[in-house]
Image (cartoon, helix red, strand yellow):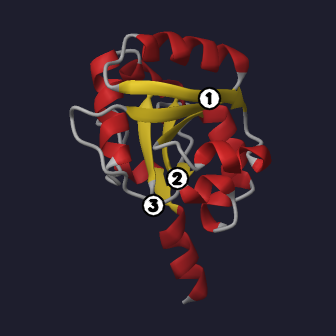
């Protein structure tokens, strides 16, 4: 985890990575979120060109579909991947965690998971961003913790 020296009075620089509609929606919510400054918004899930932008960013917000594609490539287990160097908040579709979908999320140890319905609230989104910037991972209370797998734990089991 990469904690950033953040207090409640200083703003957190965030990047938004994902599909165009997600970025447009989230940037509108971020405009109403206090103590958050947008550093960039880019198409996801490609992260190769982001290394320079990520060096000054405290937190990256990623949409569920881009996060799913990144998990398939397992960047959370690859220390050379750009997103392995920052704290990430994955904004997920609530339908993925309800019947009949029940899609388990694979996240890294420095990732947080927030439902899109929670992210619509600027106060909740701001709180999740500040906690992530401090290096504390959180999982939305609306998600069954059994549906979330931490990639670092999976790697440890495979090695054993």
- Kindly identify the residue that appears in the image at 43 percent across and 59 percent down: 2
Secondary-structure class at tag 3: loop
Q: Does residue 60 appear to the left or right of 69 in the view shown?
A: left
Which residue was labeled with disc 1? Answer: 40
- Kindly identify the residue that appears in the image at 62 percent across and 29 percent down: 40
Question: Can you tell which mark lies on residue 86?
Answer: 2
| 92 and 145: which is toward the camera | 92
**Dot 3 alpha-carbon crowd within 10 angstroms: few under 14, some 14 to 19, many 20 or more:** many
* Residue farthest bottom in this picture: 160
Question: Can you tell which mark lies on residue 109?
Answer: 3
**Dot 1 alpha-carbon crowd within 10 angstroms: few under 14, some 14 to 19, many 20 or more:** some
Position of the N terminus by quadrant: bottom left
Q: Earlier in the sequence, mark 3 or mark 2?
A: 2
> Residues under labels 1 and 2: Cα distance?
14 Å
Mark 1 or 3: in front is 1
Q: Position of residue 26 (x, y in %)?
A: 52, 18
| 76 and 14: which is toward the camera | 14
């Amino acid at each position: 985890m990469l904690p950033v020296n953040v207090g409640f009075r200083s703003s957190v620089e965030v990047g938004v990575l994902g599909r165009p509609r997600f970025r447009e929606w989230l940037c509108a919510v971020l405009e109403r979120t206090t103590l958050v400054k947008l550093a960039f918004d880019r198409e996801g899930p490609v992260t190769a060109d982001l290394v320079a932008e990520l060096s000054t960013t405290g937190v990256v917000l990623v949409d569920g579909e881009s996060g799913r594609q990144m998990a398939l490539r397992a960047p959370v287990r690859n220390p050379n991947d750009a997103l392995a160097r920052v704290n990430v908040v994955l904004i997920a579709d609530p339908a993925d965690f309800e019947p009949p979908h029940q899609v388990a999320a694979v996240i890294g140890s420095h990732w947080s998971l927030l439902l899109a319905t929670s992210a619509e609230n600027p106060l909740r989104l701001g709180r999740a961003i500040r906690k992530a910037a401090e290096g504390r991972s959180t999982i939305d209370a609306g998600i069954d913790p059994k549906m979330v797998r931490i990639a670092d734990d999976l790697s440890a089991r495979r090695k054993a």
